[in-house]
Image (tube, rainbow, N blue to C red):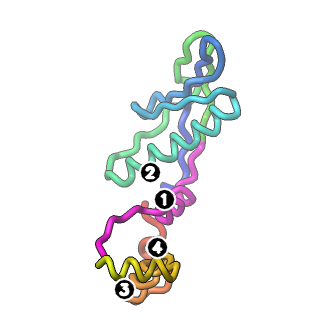
Amino acid sequence: MDRYMFPAVFEAGERKGYTVTFPDLPGCITEGDTLEEALRMAREALELHLYGMEEDGDPIPDPSPPERVHAPRGAFVTVIEAWMPLVRDEMANRAVKKTLTLPKWLNDLAEREKVNFSHVLQKALKDYLGIQDRPDHLKEQP
């Protein structure tokens, strides 16, 4: 699915800020010092949690209707939306750190010539695999 909308419970802290939980998604918890930050963090937490579930092949539950979600006294419920195509694309394009081994003489020469190792490795891998960009079958992974 590309679009999810889950109810979130926002509980005000004793001094400031909000803690946000998603009753349908145990373990999906975040917080923010202001309401604006808590809303932003809630969306990010929901997106990353759902992305992880997709990657692990876990079933994503149907969201509860917001009017059926219990909020403790002083808290409120609002719906948070996650648009997964953007999340999937961002995660597919994130940088991944790799450890590799080179002969010292080659490393020294490349550093002396101010070689961008990441750029050269990416170009070499694309050439080796015969691709220009990310293959279409990897662009949209549910």
Q: Which residue is mark 4?
A: 118
Residue at the spot x=46%, y=28% of the render?
A: 23
Tell me which corner region of the image, top left, top right, bottom left or bottom right, holds residue 35.
Answer: top right
Q: Along the polypeptide, which appears first: circle 3 or circle 2?
A: 2
Q: Which residue is mark 1?
A: 91
Task: Give the spatial CA distance, label 4 vs label 1.
Answer: 18 Å
Q: Along the polypeptide, which appears first: circle 1 or circle 3?
A: 1
Task: Give the spatial CA distance, label 3 vs label 2.
Answer: 27 Å
**Residue 139, how many percent across, how many down?**
48, 70
Q: Is residue 34 left or right of residue 30?
A: right
Q: Which secondary structure, mark 1?
A: helix
Tell me which corner region of the image, top left, top right, bottom left or bottom right, holds residue 104.
Answer: bottom left
Task: Give the spatial CA distance, label 1 vs label 3.
Answer: 21 Å
Q: Which secondary structure, mark 3?
A: helix
Question: Residue 51: which disc?
Answer: 2
Q: Is residue 32 left or right of residue 133?
A: right
Q: Which secondary structure, mark 2?
A: helix
Depth check, front residue: 41 or 104 = 104
Residues marked 2 and 1 touching at CB (< 8 Å): yes
Task: Give the spatial CA distance, label 2 vs label 1.
Answer: 9 Å
Q: Which secondary structure, mark 4?
A: helix
Q: Nearer the viewer, mark 2 or mark 4?
A: 4
Q: Residues within 10 Å of mark 2 (few under 14, many from 20)?
A: some
Q: Residues within 10 Å of mark 1 (few under 14, many from 20)?
A: few
Q: Along the polypeptide, which appears first: circle 4 or circle 1?
A: 1
Is residue 88 on the magenta stretch?
Answer: yes
Is residue 90 on the magenta stretch?
Answer: yes
Quadrant containing the C terminus in the rendered view? bottom left
Task: Give the spatial CA distance, label 3 vs label 4.
Answer: 16 Å
**Residue 12, how many percent across, how many down?**
62, 17
